[in-house]
Amino acid sequence: MPARGERMSFEVAARSVDLLLRQAAARSRVGIVFFGGEPLTNVTLIRQVVDYALARARAGEKTVDFSLTTNATLLTPELIEYFDAHRFGISVSIDGPRAIHDRNRRTVGGRGTYDVVARKVRLLLERYRSRPVGARVTLTAGTTEVEAIHAHLRGELGFHEVGYAPVTAAAGAAHALSEAELTAIYAAFEHLGEQYLAAALAGHNTGFSNLHQLMTDLHEGRRKSLPCGAGVGLLAVDRKGGLNLCHRFTGSELPTFGDVDTGIDGVQLGQFLGRAADRSGTHCATCRIRNLCAGGCYHESWLRYGDPHHRTYHYCDLLRRWVDFGIRIYSEIVARNPRFLNAHIEPRRAVA
């Protein structure tokens, strides 16, 4: 963690870039994501990596896309200008209006951070032009006011999209949502979904990212055999150069899959992914949404069951209800205003 002085060196970061470009030899475009703790505590490294990656990619005739998730507290006009010039995809971690955000996002001294974050967000949204800026909301125990959060972040602050991550992983943990709270959140998701539908029929997008992503998956006809791109198109490098399944596993006890010096351990990673794709003996084998869910988040399963391959059965019924709801919304849009999909789904994928 940067707060403990545990920062990645430029040497490790450079070897990460080299490995990425070697592994992507057949691709014309690659992406580098800067993810926490808080990436802006090490801006010097970000600038070094950008310069190095652009030079190496230019030599190999590749394009590099950069993205960043930040709590925004350290943003400055100069940094905003820099990120804008390099077309960073930016996502801000913010949990809603002051009363909600400050429940969990506080300084070491116990003060809420909303006022600082909101001021920096307004500055960012006023000046950032290269790509849309999204908000990333973490829903923890006691936080179910999804509609109020959306109205504030999208309607008042002006984020392009707002995505919600309910914390369901660790059963009994103080921050984990209860079953009743999770049910209430999905009911609120459906209310937001009805607003999304009404806006879509009028040709507008409400920025409800969770449903918009489901619309994208349905529109593209995706069939998942794995839950996400972890281990396939994505690996996370920790400060020592270890290759982790994704950013959530850095610092965990899950074994890494090689390192930036020796490269990817293809045998170990292949075995992991093979087991993840094997639905035999699981409820997923016959589940009607298996090609959209594919078993759920590895990290949630790791925290809840101690096994990243354990299916996330604790909220299967809610996911089935959510996908069924999404299919209805998508069908209505297709039938009544298919131009919305051309205008809001296809351009989104082109710049992702």
Image (cartoon, rainbow, N blue to C red):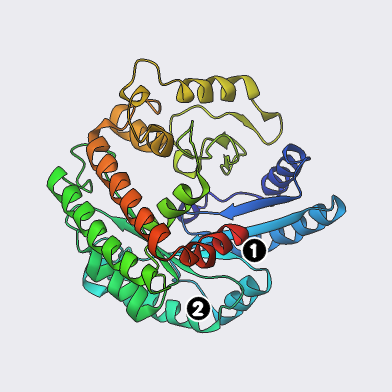
Find disc 2 in the rendering and name its residue: 124
* Residue at the spot 19% in from the left edge and 55% down from the top edge: 187
Q: Residue at x 64, y 63 (%)?
A: 44
Position of residue 246 measured from the top left corner of the image (x, y, whole percent): 51, 40
Estimate how packed mark 2 is, as few (under 14), some (14 to 19) or many (20 or more) residues with alpha carbons within 10 Å. many
- Going by the image, does 175 lie left or right of 90? left
Report the amino acid beneath label 1: Thr
Q: Residue furthest top?
A: 281
Separation of residues labelled 1 and 2 (CA atoms): 20 Å
Residue 229: which numbered mark, if any? none
Q: Residue at x 65, y 49 (%)?
A: 9
The three-letter amino acid code for the residue at tag 2 is: Leu
SS under mark 1: helix
Q: On the picture, is 57 further left or further right than 274?
A: right
Q: Considering the image in quadrants, where does the C terminus appear? A: bottom right
Above or below, comparing residue 34 to residue 276 in the picture:
below
Q: Residue furthest left?
A: 180
Residue drawn at x 33%, y 64% is: 197
Residue 41 appearing in the image: no
Q: Secondary structure at mark 2?
A: helix
